[in-house]
Image (cartoon, rainbow, N blue to C red):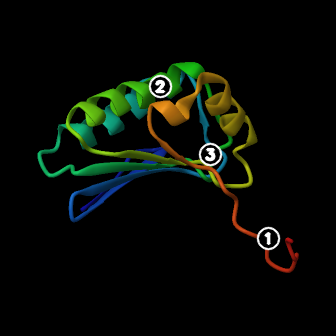
């Protein structure tokens, strides 16, 4: 199953729902309702065993939209299901900093290690 809103995509495989944001998307107050609708739709599915939100290509996220993730994390935790948020992309420095400030790691799993850049050796 795959659905696409203007700014977000949703896929499901064996109960794992994955929501992706289009590259350089600014997930701010103007997109909060759309983001909340996409997340809420995944959570409302009886098939949802876990939720992955891929923000690795997003350019920005504000506290209003982050609250959507915090609320989703609470709902999933109450049902003993995981929420994983991927911010491991090269564009996500501001999102990474926001998550550090609010202590997001206490609310959901955060993937924040960036993969190596091709052609550059990292030691």
Disc number at residue 117? 1
Rendering quarter of residue 71: top left
Q: Position of residue 46 (x, y in %)?
A: 11, 45
Q: Identify residue for label 2.
A: 32
Residue placed at 67% from the left, 24% from the top?
101
The reply to whether dot 3 and dot 1 touch (C-beta < 8 Å) is: no
Q: Position of residue 9 (x, y in %)?
A: 41, 52
- Mark 2–mark 1 distance (CA, rounded to whole Å): 31 Å
Residue placed at 68% from the left, 42% from the top?
59
Disc number at residue 2? none
* Residue 83 as seen in the image, left or right of residue 90: left
Labels 3 and 2: the sequence-earlier one: 2
Labels 2 and 1: the sequence-earlier one: 2
Q: Secondary structure at mark 2?
A: helix
Say few, some or many: other residues with alpha carbon within 10 Å of mark 2 (under 14 / 14 to 19 / 20 or more): some
- Mark 3–mark 1 distance (CA, rounded to whole Å): 18 Å
Q: Identify residue for label 3.
A: 58
The reply to whether dot 3 and dot 2 touch (C-beta < 8 Å) is: no
Q: As drawn, which residue projects farthest toward the left? A: 46
Q: Nearer the viewer, residue 79 or 5?
A: 79
């Amino acid at each position: 199953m795959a659905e696409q809103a203007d700014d977000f995509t949703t896929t499901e495989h064996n109960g794992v729902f994955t929501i992706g944001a289009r590259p350089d998307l600014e997930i701010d107050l103007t997109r909060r309702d759309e983001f909340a609708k996409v997340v809420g739709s995944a959570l409302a599915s009886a098939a949802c065993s876990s939720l992955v939100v891929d923000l690795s290509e997003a350019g920005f996220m504000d506290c209003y939209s982050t609250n959507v993730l915090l609320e989703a994390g609470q709902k999933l935790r109450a049902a003993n299901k995981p929420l994983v948020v991927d911010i491991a992309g090269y564009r996500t420095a501001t999102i990474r900093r926001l998550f550090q400030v609010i202590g997001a790691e206490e609310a959901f799993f955060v993937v924040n290690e960036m993969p190596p850049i091709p052609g550059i050796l990292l030691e």
